[in-house]
Amino acid sequence: MSKSRQSPKGQHDTTDTKVVDLFTGKPLQSGHAPRIVRLAPELDGFEALYSDTHGTPVAGQEVFSVNVLFWALLSDGKVVGLIPWYDTLLRCPDLNHPETGFFIGYFDPGIDDYLTCAPEHKRAELLAAANYFSFEASQERVILQELPDTCGTHAIFSRHENLENFTMSEVFSWRLLSDGTVQAMVIDLHEVKTWPVLLGDQSLRGCDETDDFRCFFQYRIAVKIKQQDEELQAILQSFNET
């Protein structure tokens, strides 16, 4: 571990020496969220629960759910669920705002059980995989993992801010990069050389690499869009007006 040095006079040291990076052993910088170091797919139907008010729900309060796409091991050792949310792949505990909802916990529909944190078997799986591959932090931006999308996530593209005209593509896969970011990949049909398209194909492009990417929708919403649901169309048109 490198030696710490004092901050210049008049500046505050942003290092929190109580929390260290799980893999480098170095203290994490406050104000910087722990990076994602490993992903595991959710294949057993776990859902993220959220409500329109902060705190433990009361009887009769409406609670909403969305499918967990991945479980992520963070550099501080924590494990969180990930869900496509608006224009990002959101860490469930970060869902904490009056306009979007407040994260409550996870739900296992198989046994009708509620969890306040990620299931232990997923933490064990991620830690074992991370230790096996012995990842070392690097400034080089390389692909560490590429996993298929299992939630029917769709990406919306539009050159109009109010989504008056838009196209929708299925998210084919997600790539975890060495800097901790996760890219949603869609198929560029003009670049396909052979079918079927497989993980790592040269025809895949990142949503964040295009100027017209707007947001994500999971399968249930995508179906309504394809069916031209009037209520949802109105929401789409007001999406970028707020």
Image (spheres, helix red, strand yellow):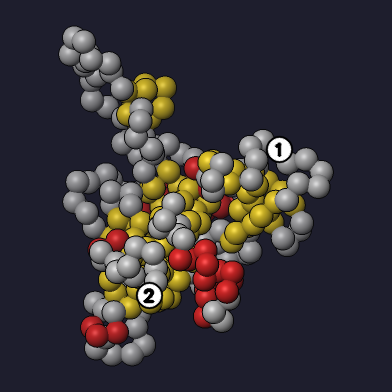
Residue 175 badge: none
Is residue 215 depicted above or below 167 in this figure? above
Q: Residue furthest right?
A: 59
* Residue at image point 36% right, 27% down: 30
Against 152, is 102 above or below?
above
From the viewer's perspective, is the residue at label 2 or at label 1 nearer?
Answer: 2
Q: Is residue 67 above or below residue 59?
A: below
Seen at 33% across and 90% down, the residue is: 195
Q: For the N terminus, give its image quadrant.
A: top left
The image quadrant of residue 227 is bottom right
Q: Amino acid at mark 2?
A: Asn
Disc 1 residue type (three-letter): Thr
**Which residue is nearer to you in this view: 23 or 70?**
70
The spot of residue 44 in percent (x, y) is 63, 64
Q: Judge whether residue 128 can be spotted in this image.
A: no
Q: Earlier in the sequence, mark 2 or mark 1?
A: 1
Would you place residue 176 above or below residue 217 in this image?
A: above
Residue 153 seen from this side: yes
Would residue 111 appear left or right of 138 to someone viewing this image? right
**Residue 17, image x and y in percent?**
36, 21
How crowded pointer 1 is (Cα within 10 Å; few <14, some 14-19, many 20+) is rated as few
Q: Which residue is mark 2?
A: 165
Q: Secondary structure at mark 1?
A: loop
Q: Residue 133 in the image: x percent, y percent?
A: 35, 54
Left or right? Give the position of 195 relative to 41. left
Residue 155, horizontal then vertical, whole percent: 41, 69
Q: What residue is shown with label 1?
A: 56
On the rendered structure, is 183 left or right of 119? Answer: left
C-alpha separation, residue under disc 2 versus residue under disc 1? 40 Å
